């Protein structure tokens, strides 16, 4: 520890940094239950709204891997301060966005500027806490990483219904300014080294940003434009593939890469990155899917949606102290297997979803999903990052955290594609059964035609109205079946992840690295 750190109890700077991490993660999903309101306020089409979330994730994915290098350049203290200040300023301009294009641009800035707060907390915990206390700090970080996105729709729904959707971003101003003011006085872990700017791998940075950005564009827009039938999608797919391959080669051959891919030679770290990816798929995609279902299928308001998903956050909070008690007695690998398996079980229970599911029906699946989240996330911090030598933590933490957010971005894009494709398929299947030979359908159409025909106006319009109502019912059921398919796909990912955990080696709680390790 440096003298600066020793002057302050490690708990206070850790809490302030965790607050920054919390608001950065919260803002990924705080818009989830308010997408319809934001879309209406900005006159955005339904297929454009998901970019309010995805743009933020893409920006974070690009910036998070760079955080290790940026920490060495500017120091933990000043990078976190710059990140908190930039996040606060970009939150303000998000609140004054005037159309969907400006909103997407400002969300990109918000993600880019605020992203460094996330991995910096992970690495700083290794400096602040040693020995058994590492279990507590990992549990806190794991809880924040899982519960902040979960609470996003709840907090966002309340703000939107009580105030206005623009306050989703304005609420960041006070905590953001407080964090920006406190960090320079509390956190003094290391010193800046601006000379690293001269020998930085700038081509690698460009290749990484180009590869990840175009990859996410392909995943997000592919279903909308019929995938590779569209020339733009084909071109972006080629750019993503070539850029990512060149980035990997560059990172493995360049002396001082900005992302330490060589750390993947460690079995624990490589598996930890994959499990972090799957966890990101589960956490972020389910928070995307559930509000989307409640909004478009059930017609819930933002506040009703927030209340319906609140049980996930409550279950996550209950799971944290249970994890801390068990982590002191049991191997972290088995606790992680329990967390991943329970998450997969929750996705299986979600697959029985019907069009009339609300808060009551969602309670058990969401408890199964929320309670074990800390079990899935916290052990990976020690099992994955704890397997590396201290001098590699900063670079490796960026890659580790990127995988979770990349999982979220890929999961959201893939689930959107599944819903689009499977809705059409299920609708066609349902339509094939809606023929004159279907007695139940004939009775329904006749009854609705009589009801609508009895209203004042054109009596002949009754049958047309009945057929339109039938179409809406068929589409609703097709959409619901598509949501179930998306949840099953997530379940399969967690089954694979659970089976891979025993391949990880047991890791002792690591010792704290030297404060000036670079």
Image (cartoon, rainbow, N blue to C red):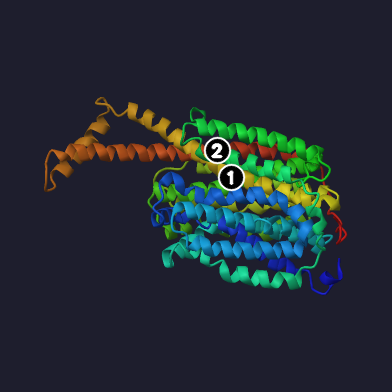
Spatial separation of the CA atoms under disc 2 and disc 1: 9 Å
The residue tagged 2 is 219
Q: Residue at x 64, y 72 (%)?
A: 178
Q: Residue at x 74, y 64 (%)?
A: 78
User: Which image quadrant for residue 28?
Assistant: bottom right
Q: Residue at x 71, y 55 (%)?
A: 119
Image spot of residue 129 (x, y percent): 81, 63
Q: Nearer the viewer, residue 455 or 45?
A: 45
Quick one: quadrant of the C terminus? bottom right
Q: Is residue 187 above or below residue 363?
A: below
Which SS class for mark 2? helix
Which SS class for mark 1? helix
The residue tagged 1 is 409
Q: Nearer the viewer, residue 5 or 78?
A: 78
Q: Are marks 2 and 1 in contact (CB under 8 Å)?
A: yes
Image spot of residue 203 (x, y percent): 72, 43
Q: Nearer the viewer, residue 167 or 62?
A: 62
Answer with left or right where residue 166 lies relative to residue 374. left
Image spot of residue 471 (x, y percent): 30, 37
Answer with left or right where residue 17 lies relative to residue 317. right
Image spot of residue 179 (x, y percent): 66, 69
Label 1, residues with CA under 10 Å away: few <14, some 14-19, many ≥20: many
User: Which image quadrant for residue 244?
Assistant: top right
Label 2, residues with CA under 10 Å away: few <14, some 14-19, many ≥20: many
């Amino acid at each position: 520890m440096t003298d600066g750190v020793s002057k302050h109890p490690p708990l206070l700077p850790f809490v302030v940094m965790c607050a920054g991490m919390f608001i950065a993660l919260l803002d990924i999903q705080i818009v989830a239950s308010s997408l319809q309101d934001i879309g209406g306020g900005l006159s955005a089409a339904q297929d454009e709204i998901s970019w309010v979330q995805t743009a933020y994730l893409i920006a974070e994915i690009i910036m998070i891997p760079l955080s290790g290098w940026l920490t060495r350049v500017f120091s933990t203290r000043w990078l976190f301060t710059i990140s908190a200040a930039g996040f606060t300023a970009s939150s303000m301009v998000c609140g004054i966005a005037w159309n969907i294009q400006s909103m997407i641009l400002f969300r990109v800035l918000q993600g880019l500027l605020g992203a460094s707060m996330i991995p910096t907390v992970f690495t700083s915990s290794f400096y602040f806490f040693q020995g058994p206390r590492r279990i507590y700090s990992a549990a806190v970080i794991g809880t924040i990483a899982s519960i902040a996105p979960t609470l996003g729709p709840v907090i966002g729904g309340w703000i939107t219904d009580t105030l206005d959707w623009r306050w989703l971003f304005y609420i960041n101003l006070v905590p953001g300014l407080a964090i920006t003011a406190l960090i320079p006085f509390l956190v003094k872990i290391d010193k800046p080294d601006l000379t690293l700017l001269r020998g930085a791998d700038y081509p690698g940075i460009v290749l990484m940003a180009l590869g990840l950005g175009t990859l996410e564009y392909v995943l997000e827009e592919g279903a909308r434009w019929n995938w590779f039938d569209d020339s733009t999608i084909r071109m972006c797919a080629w750019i993503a593939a070539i850029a990512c391959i060149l980035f990997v080669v560059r990172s493995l051959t360049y002396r001082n890469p900005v992302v330490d891919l060589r750390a993947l030679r460690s079995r624990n770290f490589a598996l930890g990155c994959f499990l972090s990816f799957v966890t990101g798929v589960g956490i972020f995609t389910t928070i995307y899917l559930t509000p989307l279902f409640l909004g478009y299928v059930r017609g819930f308001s933002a506040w009703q949606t927030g209340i319906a998903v609140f049980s996930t956050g409550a279950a996550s909070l209950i799971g944290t102290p249970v994890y801390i008690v068990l982590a002191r007695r049991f191997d972290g690998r088995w606790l992680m297997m329990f967390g991943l398996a329970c998450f997969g079980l929750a996705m299986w229970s979600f697959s029985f979803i019907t069009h009339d599911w609300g808060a009551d029906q969602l309670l058990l699946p969401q408890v199964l999903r929320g309670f074990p989240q800390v079990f899935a996330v916290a052990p990976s911090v020690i099992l994955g990052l704890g397997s590396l030598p201290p001098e590699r933590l900063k670079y490796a933490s960026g890659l580790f955290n990127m995988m979770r957010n990349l999982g979220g971005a890929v999961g959201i894009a893939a689930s959107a594609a599944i819903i689009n494709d499977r809705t059409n398929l299920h609708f066609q299947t349902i339509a094939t059964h809606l023929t004159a030979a279907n007695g139940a359908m004939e009775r329904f159409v006749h009854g609705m035609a009589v009801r609508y025909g009895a209203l004042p106006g054109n009596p002949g319009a009754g049958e047309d109205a009945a057929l339109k109502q039938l179409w809406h019912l068929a589409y609703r059921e097709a959409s619901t079946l598509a949501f179930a398919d998306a949840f099953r796909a997530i379940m399969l990912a967690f089954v694979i992840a659970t089976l891979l955990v025993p391949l990880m080696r047991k890791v002792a709680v690591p010792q704290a690295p030297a404060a000036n390790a670079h």
